[in-house]
Image (tube, rainbow, N blue to C red):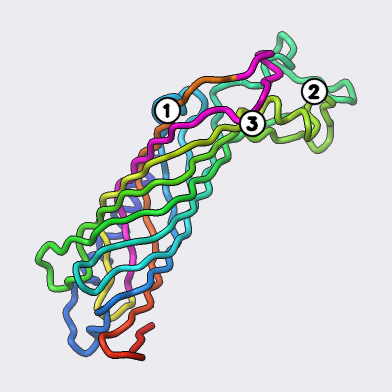
Amino acid sequence: MRNVLLFILLCCLPLLLWGQQRNSKYALNKGNALMFKLSYAGHSPGGDLADRFGNNFSFGAGAGLITGKGSWILGGDFAYLFGGEVKEDVLASLRTPEGAIIGNDRGYADVGLRERGFYLGAHVGKLISIGLPNPRSGIRLTVGAGLLQHKVRIQDDPLSGVPQLDENYKKGYDRLSNGLAFTEFIGYQVMSMDKRVNFYIGFEFTQGFTMSRRDFNFDTRAKDETERTDLLYGIRVGWIIPLYFGQEAGEVYY
């Protein structure tokens, strides 16, 4: 994943330079602006989350406002989390000594485990100009709060069903957990003067204080009442679609 993140950073360098070009003819990135954004991130887990899952990725979407004076930022975010590494074998009690799961055809069933989850929240922050020609580009700092949820997705074998893993029984194995989360972002944002290049990239850190939401885990034969601290840290890059509102009434740039 480190090589992927390094490649993303190198690809963004030309865009950083483009966003600083001065051209008064196209200096339309002024006033308040609505920002609609799409993003992608790669995360490494920490805390209790690292005991259950490996690295994950997320697709994000959101909307917000940046003010013309002070460049204050306010907005909301949704991020869908997914990953392919599950460290905690929630189906261990169903496996044979060889590690296989027997399907209803008495053959081995290919049952996979995946990570799934989401973050939903709001954020506030500020864009700090660092003396470059374009005042609408600079250091982006935000803090936010919301809901973090994650679970183990049990992926069925389409050719061999497992009676113990029908839709109702899966809930006893999926470790559904959620709770309050805080997130911080520090990075660089470009909103170019000619509006052609608008993006951000930076470091994202999330702390989730979650608990299991299932009444009973079938494999442990008990309710999990652990108060968890789930951490995520990584790089997020996003594309911004801005809608500018000029100083005069009715003046809109898009």
Q: Residue at x 49, y 36 (%)?
A: 179
- First to last magenta residue range: 197-223
Residue sitting nearer the eye, 103 or 150: 150
Magenta stretch contains residue 202: yes
* Element carrying mark 2: strand
Q: Badge 2 is on which residue?
A: 108
Q: Is residue 69 left or right of residue 155?
A: left
The numbered dot on residue 113 is: 3
Classify the position of the C terminus by image quarter.
bottom left
Q: Badge 1 is on which residue?
A: 229
Give me the C-alpha separation between circle 2 and circle 3.
Answer: 16 Å
Q: Residue at x 80, y 38 (%)?
A: 158
Give me the C-alpha separation between circle 3 and circle 1.
Answer: 22 Å
Circle 3 or circle 1, nearest the eye: 1
Determine whether label 1 and label 2 are within 8 Å by CB.
no
Tell me: residue 15, above or below residue 45.
below
Determine whether label 2 and label 3 are within 8 Å by CB.
no
* Element carrying mark 1: strand
Give me the C-alpha separation between circle 1 and circle 2.
Answer: 36 Å
- Residue 62 placement (x, y as % from top left): 45, 61
Q: Amino acid at mark 1?
A: Thr
Q: Amino acid at mark 3?
A: Leu
Mark 1 is surrounded, within 10 Å at the Cα level, by few (under 14), some (14 to 19) or many (20 or more) other residues, namely some
Q: Earlier in the sequence, mark 3 or mark 1?
A: 3
- Residue 60 placement (x, y as % from top left): 47, 55
